[in-house]
Amino acid sequence: MSKLRIGIIGSGGTGTRHAERFSEMEAAEVVAIASRNTETGNALAEKHGAEFIPDWQALVERDNLDGVLICTHNDTHAEIALAALRCDKHIFMEYPLARSIDAGEAVVEIAESNQRVLRINHSETVSNSHRAVKQRAQELGDLLLTTFLRLTPGRGARPEILFNLPVSGPPAHFFIYHIYPIIDIFGGARSVEGSAVYEGLTDQGNYNRFVNTVNVKFKNGGIGSWVWAGGVEIQESEQHSRYILTGGTISDSDGKWHCSTGAEVEEIPPVDAPNISLQERWVQEIQTQETSAAHRDAVTALEAIRVSLSAEQSMQEKRRIVLE
Ligand SMILES: NC(=O)c1ccc[n+]([C@@H]2O[C@H](COP(=O)([O-])OP(=O)(O)OC[C@H]3O[C@@H](n4cnc5c(N)ncnc54)[C@H](OP(=O)(O)O)[C@@H]3O)[C@@H](O)[C@H]2O)c1
């Protein structure tokens, strides 16, 4: 089988990691890199023996590419995905799917109608641990409450651009990978309320300390609470999730999941299945022209951004947003 020819857009942290990963794969080759950053773009292209193309629009139009990886900032994901899908490319993109719900819907729709494999880099999709938690939750009756709490002492080494409201969206949006698994297990939201406090917010949209909360009512019943306080006075980061159902409570601790009932606490081990990376799955799906699983996961990613972007709208309009 001939190798899948890949073009990567963006030459920062994730672009570099994906370039390494795909270059190591037997079934794929990195053919072209596009970035507005000519220095890092050229260097990355040279490292992988790929062509450097300064303009991403020119890359997506290339006939010598099968798939495009989108590793740019959040405000460009959907625009690039739409352009590449219109040129019949398969897409592997960084989360979040889009910076607006309309744009996210358009991307998912065109991928389905053009029968392209659209994968958004949500690792739960291939996580045997997540599969086990999902199965267990389905056995435990009705959802009462999901809670997520994250406290971080500083912004650490994370790129500044994440903490820029217009480009990246609020924390709940650029950290959508903490919302995606909840939506995957319990389904989408019926209503969303968000609030946020940003300290040191500049005219450009950068900020320092922040608190962001999102509260949802799920379509299938139960409520959810998501909280991240960043840059707060605390020695070490902490984070935990709880899924409270009528038949038991699922919780995470030190990277392991447990189920607690009145009678006992037991670990939820990962499902016993082969490990495959999402990148490998994407390549296989393109080779076998299997688009349905990717489409289903893209719909989940869309439901997840409906929550984060409705929360953003709720903060702006200071009201609860009721979804269709
Ligand atoms: N899956 C994960 O584990 C993970 C981890 C971190 C981030 N992410 C996501 O990955 C994406 C990229 O993050 P990152 O950390 O790689 O950011 P980054 O290091 O700043 O890299 C982004 C790259 O895209 C380029 N770029 C930005 N806008 C562009 C445009 N309009 N046209 C062409 N090139 C453009 C940037 O150029 P400049 O150098 O000129 O800015 C840079 O080369 C973000 O959406 C982020 O949320 C995912």
Image (cartoon, rainbow, N blue to C red):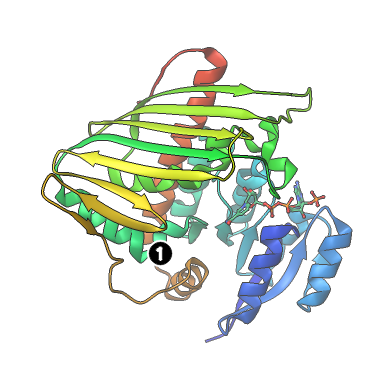
Q: Amino acid at mark 1?
A: Val
Above or below for 153 versus 293: above
SS at circle 1? helix
Q: Could you say where residue 244 lies in the image, as x and y percent from the top left?
A: 24, 39
Residue extending farthest to the left is 263
Position in image of residue 81 (x %, y %) = 60, 51
Determine whether 306 is above or below 47 in the image: above
User: Assess mark 1: CB under 8 A from ligand 1?
Assistant: no
Query: Is residue 60 something that shows in the picture?
Result: no
Number of other residues with Cα within 10 Å of mark 1, as a class: few under 14, some 14 to 19, many 20 or more: some
Circle 1 is placed at which residue position? 126
Percent position of residue 286, x then y: 48, 70
User: Hey, which quadrant is residue 217 in on the image?
Assistant: top left
Q: Nearer the viewer, residue 53 or 114?
A: 53
Q: Quadrant of residue 179?
A: top left
In this view, the residue in front, 106 or 34, is 34
- Residue 45 seen from this side: yes
Split into 4 quadrants, where in the image is the C terminus? top left
Task: Please give the name of the residue rendered at 49% of the width and 58% of the height, measured from the top-left corner.
Answer: 119
* Residue ID at (26%, 60%): 268
Depicted 114 relative to depicted 276: above or below: above
